[in-house]
């Protein structure tokens, strides 16, 4: 028996679709944009650390620590991206 030719599938030769690039990945290809992003993240982390040192309420402190950890994780990803793409 032959394979069905339903919906034009017989013409496709297992072509893989192009990889989906996220906006962040496109921005990180530019060294200038990557540097600007890292500088913005460092500045925001500094502001969060300043608020933490100043003393915040228990609820706000927990939120700020969570955000700070998110920024730290983002910096790790950005550094790995640099190593991977270089």
Image (spheres, helix red, strand yellow):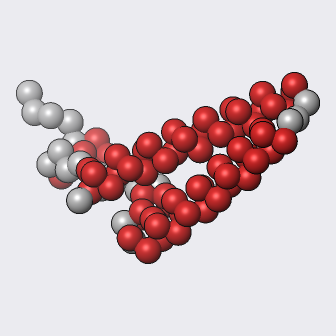
The image shows a total of numbered marks equal to: 0
Q: Is residue 5 above or below residue 81?
A: above
| Left or right relative to 68: residue 72 | left
| Left or right relative to 74: residue 52 | right
**30 or 44, which lies in front?**
44
Q: In this view, does 77 lie above or below 55?
A: below
Position of the C terminus by quadrant: bottom left
The structure residue drawn at horizontal position 61% and vertical position 35%, both measured from the top left corner, is 69
The x and y percentages for residue 39 are 55, 63
The structure residue drawn at horizontal position 53% and vertical position 69%, both measured from the top left corner, is 36
| Left or right relative to 16: residue 28 | right
**30 or 17, which lies in front?**
30
The x and y percentages for residue 32 are 44, 74
The structure residue drawn at horizontal position 87% and vertical position 27%, both measured from the top left corner, is 59
Position of the N terminus by quadrant: top left
**Farthest right residue in view:** 57
**7 or 47, which lies in front?**
47
The structure residue drawn at horizontal position 81% and vertical position 31%, both measured from the top left corner, is 61
**Farthest front residue in view:** 53
Q: Is residue 33 above or below residue 67?
A: below
The x and y percentages for residue 57 are 91, 30
**Farthest left residue in view:** 1
Residue 81 in view, yes or no: yes
Residue 10 in view, yes or no: no
The x and y percentages for residue 21 are 41, 56
């Amino acid at each position: 028996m032959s394979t069905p030719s339903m919906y034009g599938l017989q013409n496709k030769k297992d072509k893989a679709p192009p990889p989906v690039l996220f906006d962040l990945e496109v921005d990180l290809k530019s060294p200038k944009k990557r540097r600007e992003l890292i500088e913005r993240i460092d500045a925001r982390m500094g502001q969060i650390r300043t608020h933490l040192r100043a003393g915040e309420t228990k609820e706000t402190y927990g939120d700020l620590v969570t955000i700070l950890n998110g920024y730290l994780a983002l910096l790790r990803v950005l550094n790995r991206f640099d190593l991977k793409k270089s």
